[in-house]
Amino acid sequence: MELHAARLDEARRVAIFGGTHGNEMSGVMLVNLWVQNNTEVQRKGVEVQPFITNPKAVEKCTRYVDTDLNRAFTPENLSTLGGGDLPYEVRRAQEINRMFGPKGSPEAYDVIFDLHNTTSNMGCTLLLESSKDHFNLCLVLLNEHPLLKYSTSRSVAKHPVGLEVGPQPQGVLRSNIFESMRDILKHALDFIELFNAAGFPITEGLEVGIPIDYPRDDNGNIIAMVHPNLQDCDWEPLNPGDPMFQTFDGKTIHYQGSGTVYPTFINEAAYYEKQQAFATTRRESLVASAIRKA
Ligand SMILES: CC(=O)N[C@@H](CC(=O)O)C(=O)O
Ligand SMILES: [Zn+2]
């Protein structure tokens, strides 16, 4: 995939979102820390705002209260009237859109980093929403698919960046995951400061995801688990014929696709309700020949 040359403006207004999912503890704790004392995240010439996006879900330590905030930023939700009758997260999405957007407008924040934890063994992954956004770089999962109706919290920014770090169980804080997330974010902010000062050529590999559901019976109940050979093997090749699921009576279900894929979000706890056991990805190379205006 070849990207064409483009000129980008500086990133002057940056937000760090934590608690988009109230039970993903590293982002919640880091943002709370930085709200109290922001010296660690200040960078020259950049206004950095740490912000808890779903305080009610954080208080209850659940993913969401009424509906998934990270799917709530649809044009319909953002324009609907109804005030107090609307689901909590829809009202919250409207507030966030007013504060950090409006989505798609010149007034929108330049960059939003949205901090997430996964229960899968994915390590550290940046989640991007457009292959045409030259500002973003690094090892990434590109969530750009015509069938994906994503509508994330960070999508109100001009350059949305999700940061997913795992494995960490829901409602649990693990020091190694917390410190990795902190490290990546500090590097990302350093990058913005340097990026504002001078341009960068960007060339990296990336992956595009398609969701795979668990095998289910006619009532929608799952009838198999992630196979032990696949569990924790995020980003490793899954070839046609490889074990994928194991039924409760011990039968193996093999991957039937036409070619090698690289699974991610394997056995993510939050995705049982979304009919997703893992996402398959393919390797692609994005080449951005352009940089910030020199
Ligand atoms: C485990 C988890 O919450 N993942 C995020 C990924 C993202 O932010 O794009 C989500 O589904 O919203
Ligand atoms: Zn999340």
Image (cartoon, rainbow, N blue to C red):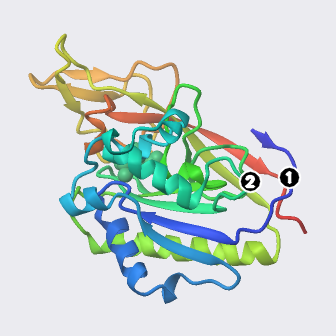
Residue 244 higher or lower than 267, as above or below: above
Which quadrant of the rendered structure holds the N terminus? Answer: top right
Residue 211 higher or lower than 170, as above or below: above
Q: Mark on residue 197?
A: none
Q: Quadrant of residue 11?
A: bottom right
- How busy is the neighbourhood of tag 2: few (under 14 within 10 Å), some, or many (20 plus)? many
- Residue 140 % position (x, y): 56, 51
- Residues tagged 1 and 2 counted as in contact (Cβ below 8 A): yes
Q: Is residue 108 left or right of residue 202?
A: left
- How busy is the neighbourhood of tag 1: few (under 14 within 10 Å), some, or many (20 plus)? some
Label 1: which secondary element: loop
The one nearer the camera, 279 or 113, is 113
Task: Say whether disc 1 or disc 2 marks the residue closer to the N-terminus.
Answer: 1
Q: Is residue 85 left or right of residue 113?
A: left
Which quadrant of the rendered structure holds the C terminus? Answer: bottom right
Q: Residue furthest top?
A: 218
Which residue is at 67% across, 47% downward? 104
Residue 205 higher or lower than 147, as above or below: below
For label 1, the residue is: 6
Q: Residue furthest left?
A: 249
Q: Quadrant of residue 115?
A: bottom left
Q: For the residue marked with disc 1, what is the amino acid?
A: Ala
Can the viewer see residue 229 in this picture?
A: yes
For label 2, the residue is: 134
Which residue is at 69% across, 78% downward? 193
